[in-house]
């Protein structure tokens, strides 16, 4: 055949493919989410997330040490609390001696150079399993925002570099910025879960924290998966309220949203490769449907290619190992 254009020429060898590869992924772009539980020497299995554990603070410290050895620099903490610590207002979230703040302090002291991100939302502390205060079956916005702002101060005092509101209440980024600034925490950043969709892919996370909603669903605050332009509205609001980074969540069914958001904002864009996305690859590999490592690598590169600058992923440690061995 007489062909002027033969795209296969650029795929001829591995070195040539590396030369023209459009997407890079660095270990420092990965954030490892961590589930924390009370006690000592606790390492509890999460059925739907093989390889991920709830860890007591002592175990968590060694785990972070291991991750740091692999080059991981950023961590996001979620506390799993027993029911006795839960109430309708999530009061435990404001306890400076609670599980999350004390562990943040411990990590801050031991690892001064890592980036500590803390999740700001009521669900780990709420007896209703919602991200806000519930009144007459409704999740009330403004009262919740007041609590989230106070919670952010507790996390900043304990050493969080970045607070990360995952609740989807209106106006919380601005309220958190004001609260942090009024306490002198002008350097504490806000990574906002700006476009967080009401998703079936959060299931394993709710098992991890035992935080499934006691009634209804989260559709009055998390976004509808049929909407894309609405994501831009949320991003614009969070930007105007002072967010330092924005997030799209989940990642895989929302690669178009990541791409759209990237083209509309000058802020770093994060994407959360959520628990269900992790669990499905694990289960698929176990069932012999896919190769786990190849599926992990392809998935994380696809999220990066879509435009994510930062990726929250339970695969952070194996991916860091892969990048060390294979990235060029
Ligand atoms: C809740 C929260 C959720 C996740 C992070 N923060 C679940 C939810 O909104 O119900 C999900 C993370 C994951 O699935 O990995 N504030």
Image (cartoon, grey):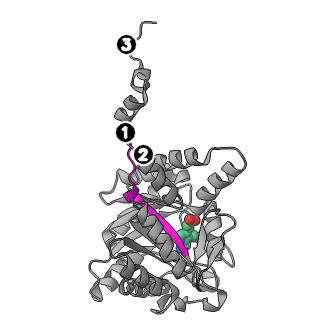
Residue in the picture at 46% in, 47% down: 301
Upstream in the sequence, badge 1 or badge 2? 1
Residue picked out by circle 3: 4
Q: Which residues are magenta?
A: 21-35
From where the camera sits, is residue 167 visible?
Answer: no
* Cα distance between the residues tagged 2 and 3: 28 Å
Quarter-of-image position of residue 127: bottom right
Toward the right, the furthest residue is 287
Residue picked out by circle 1: 22
State the image coordinates of residue 259 (x, y, percent, origin top left). 42, 49
Cβ–Cβ under 8 Å for marks 1 and 2: yes
Cβ–Cβ under 8 Å for marks 3 and 1: no
- Compared across the picture, whether 82 is left or right of 15 comes to right
Upstream in the sequence, badge 2 or badge 3? 3
Residue picked out by circle 2: 305
In the foreground, 253 or 318: 318
Residue behind label 2 places its C-beta within 8 angstroms of ligand 1: no
State the image coordinates of residue 209 (x, y, percent, origin top left). 61, 76
Is 141 rendered above or below residue 47? below
Residue in the picture at 61% in, 88% down: 86
- Compared across the picture, whether 83 is left or right of 256 comes to right
State the image coordinates of residue 130 (x, y, percent, origin top left). 59, 78
């Amino acid at each position: 055949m007489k062909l002027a254009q033969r795209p296969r020429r650029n795929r001829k060898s591995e070195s040539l493919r590396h030369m023209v590869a459009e997407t890079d992924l660095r270990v420092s772009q990965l954030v490892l989410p961590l589930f924390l539980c009370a006690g000592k020497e606790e390492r509890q299995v999460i059925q739907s997330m093989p390889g991920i554990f709830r860890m007591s603070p002592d175990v968590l410290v060694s785990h972070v040490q291991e991750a740091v050895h692999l080059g991981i620099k950023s961590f996001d903490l979620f506390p799993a609390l027993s029911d006795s610590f839960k109430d309708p207002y999530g009061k435990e979230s404001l306890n400076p001696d609670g599980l999350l703040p004390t562990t943040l302090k411990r990590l801050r002291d031991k690892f001064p150079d890592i980036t500590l991100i803390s999740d700001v939302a009521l669900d780990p502390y709420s007896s209703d399993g919602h991200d806000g205060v519930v009144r007459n079956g409704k999740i009330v916005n403004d009262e919740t925002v007041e609590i989230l702002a106070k919670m952010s101060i507790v996390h900043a005092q304990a050493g969080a570099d970045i607070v990360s509101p995952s609740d989807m209440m209106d106006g919380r980024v601005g309220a958190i910025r004001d609260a942090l600034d009024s306490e002198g925490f002008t350097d504490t950043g806000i990574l906002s879960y700006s476009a967080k969709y009401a998703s079936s892919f959060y299931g394993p996370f709710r098992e991890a924290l035992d935080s499934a909603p006691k009634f209804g669903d989260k559709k009055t605050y998390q976004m509808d998966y049929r909407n894309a332009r609405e994501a831009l509205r949320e991003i614009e609001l969070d930007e105007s309220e002072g967010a330092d980074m924005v997030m799209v969540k989940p990642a895989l069914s929302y690669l178009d949203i990541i791409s759209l958001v990237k083209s509309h904002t000058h802020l770093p864009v994060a994407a959360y490769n959520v628990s269900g996305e992790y669990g499905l690859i694990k289960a698929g590999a176990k069932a012999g449907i896919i190769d786990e490592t190849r599926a992990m690598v392809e998935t994380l590169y696809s999220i990066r290619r879509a435009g994510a600058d930062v990726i929250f992923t339970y695969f952070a440690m194996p991916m860091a190992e892969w990048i060390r061995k294979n990235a060029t």
